[in-house]
């Protein structure tokens, strides 16, 4: 038997919010001038999604605390309590596409950002939705933080932060679900700046992240063809119950279905994916190595794809397999199998999408592990993987 799903990933590739025409791949860029505040908005991003840190509750005070994920800055020992932290009250006005995402359970959280010009300075707003009353061991910036103009090579080095957390681990206190606004300041960008890369903000996925600045569209327009519906070998139910003819019970593996005849493929790295995009549906194949003759699996209805605008593409089925049930797959130890998840169709212009699996409920089985998963996917890269999933009959050498 083996784990269900993948081990949780901390962070995903950053996506810039872009308005794009149907059926074309393009990069939208813009500036926005606020008449009331004088703020010029260069760009904004729904951000990377990260796994929510574990939240603990003090039984006496009822206060909740979360320790932030390790950021690999252990050699820097300076620490502080962040004071006078700004709260962004208009977060969902800035990112209305995240409304539905934030209604989900706190198993993952978007690390959104916004790049602006304010009072003759360039300001990078890093937003953090509070998973607890207190978050400790946070990290924002150091001397590595800068913006680099991709045309001139000009480096805009960090000036300061608000609150003052420069080169320090720190603690933030606010109400649960408040969105704190951590600000990083730079010199004003040149009026001719078209693209910058942002470095030195690992928790927001900015370690060379490209940001386009300007008006209209840049880049190339490329029509994206649809794929044909993939044909996979579908498994079948060998036994309705492993050994006890009783209603399905997640805590009693004797009541789980037993499946056979999974789609076999050539050996590849566990968890390799391929994607097919059609007008009617999206097909996501995942390859696994079978470590045991009889191995258990499960796929839930809350598995989803999420784009950079926060739109969710819901799962419809797992071809030939039960959903929301633990089941066994019989085969040979050493088999490589592929399961196909079917989602709502993706827009043709979409190039990046996020695969999200919330953590599952505990269950009683040897080695039980239903870890959540937050995984960035590049649509074209996965389309290029389609050939890896051709059916490959089992070869037995005696």
Image (cartoon, rainbow, N blue to C red):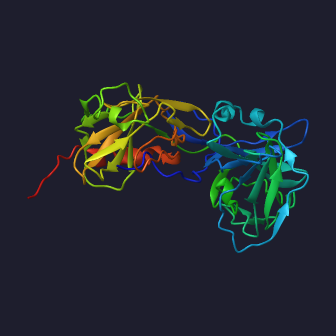
Q: In the rendering, at what x and y percent does residue 71 appear?
A: 66, 63
| Number of dots carrying numbers | 0
The quarter of the picture where residue 83 lies is bottom right
Residue 42 lies left or right of residue 306; in this view the side is right
Closer-to-camera residue (75/257): 257
Q: Where 122 sits versus 349, above or below?
A: below
Q: In the rendering, at what x and y percent does residue 215 appear?
A: 70, 42
Residue visible at 35% across and 35% down in the picture: 227
Closer-to-camera residue (173/349): 173
Closer-to-camera residue (80/215): 80
Q: Is residue 256 visible?
A: no
Residue 398 lies left or right of residue 33; in this view the side is left
Residue 328 lies left or right of residue 310; in this view the side is left
Q: In the rendering, at what x and y percent does residue 90 appear?
A: 81, 35
Q: Where 105 sits versus 246, above or below?
A: below
Q: Is residue 310 visible?
A: yes
Q: Where 208 sits versus 289, above or below?
A: below
Residue lying at the far left of the rendered structure: 398
Residue visible at 52% across and 48% down in the picture: 376
Closer-to-camera residue (365/297): 365
Q: In the rendering, at what x and y percent does residue 370 appear?
A: 48, 44
Residue visible at 63% across and 60% down in the picture: 208
Assign the C terminus to one quadrant of the image. Answer: bottom left
């Amino acid at each position: 038997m083996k784990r269900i799903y993948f081990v949780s990933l901390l962070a995903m590739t950053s996506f810039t919010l872009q308005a794009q025409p149907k059926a074309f791949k393009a990069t939208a860029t813009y500036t926005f001038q606020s008449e009331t505040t004088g703020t010029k908005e260069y760009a904004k991003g729904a951000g990377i999604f990260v796994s929510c840190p574990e939240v603990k509750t003090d039984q006496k005070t009822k206060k909740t605390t979360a320790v932030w994920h390790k950021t690999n800055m252990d050699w820097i020992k300076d620490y502080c309590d962040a004071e006078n932290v700004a709260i962004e009250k208009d977060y969902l006005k800035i990112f209305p596409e995240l409304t539905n995402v934030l209604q989900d359970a706190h198993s993952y959280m978007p690390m959104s950002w916004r790049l602006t010009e304010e009072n003759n300075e360039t300001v990078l707003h890093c937003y953090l939705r509070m998973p607890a009353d207190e978050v400790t061991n946070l990290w924002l910036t150091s001397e590595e933080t800068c913006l680099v103009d991709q045309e001139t090579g000009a480096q805009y080095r960090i000036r300061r932060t608000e609150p003052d957390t420069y080169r320090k681990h720190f603690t933030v206190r606010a109400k649960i679900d408040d969105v704190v606004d951590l600000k990083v300041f730079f010199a004003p960008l040149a009026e001719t700046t078209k693209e910058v890369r942002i470095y030195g903000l690992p928790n927001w996925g900015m370690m060379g992240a490209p940001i386009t600045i300007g008006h209209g569209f840049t880049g190339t327009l490329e029509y994206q063809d649809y794929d044909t519906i993939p044909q996979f070998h579908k498994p079948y139910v060998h036994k309705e119950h492993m050994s006890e003819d009783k209603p399905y019970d997640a805590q009693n593996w004797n009541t789980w279905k037993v499946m056979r005849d999974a789609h076999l493929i050539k050996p590849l790295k566990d968890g390799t994916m391929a994607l097919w995009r059609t007008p009617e549906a999206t097909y996501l194949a995942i390859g696994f190595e079978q470590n045991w003759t009889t191995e258990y699996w499960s796929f839930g209805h809350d598995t989803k794809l999420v784009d950079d605008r926060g739109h969710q593409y819901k799962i419809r089925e797992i071809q030939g397999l039960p959903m929301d049930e633990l089941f066994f797959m019989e085969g040979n130890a050493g088999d490589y199998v592929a399961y196909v998840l079917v989602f709502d169709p993706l827009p043709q212009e979409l190039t990046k999408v996020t695969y999200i699996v919330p953590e599952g409920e505990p269950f009683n089985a040897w080695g039980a592990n239903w870890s959540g998963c937050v995984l960035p996917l590049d649509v074209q890269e996965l389309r290029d993987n389609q050939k890896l999933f051709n059916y490959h009959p089992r070869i037995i050498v005696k």
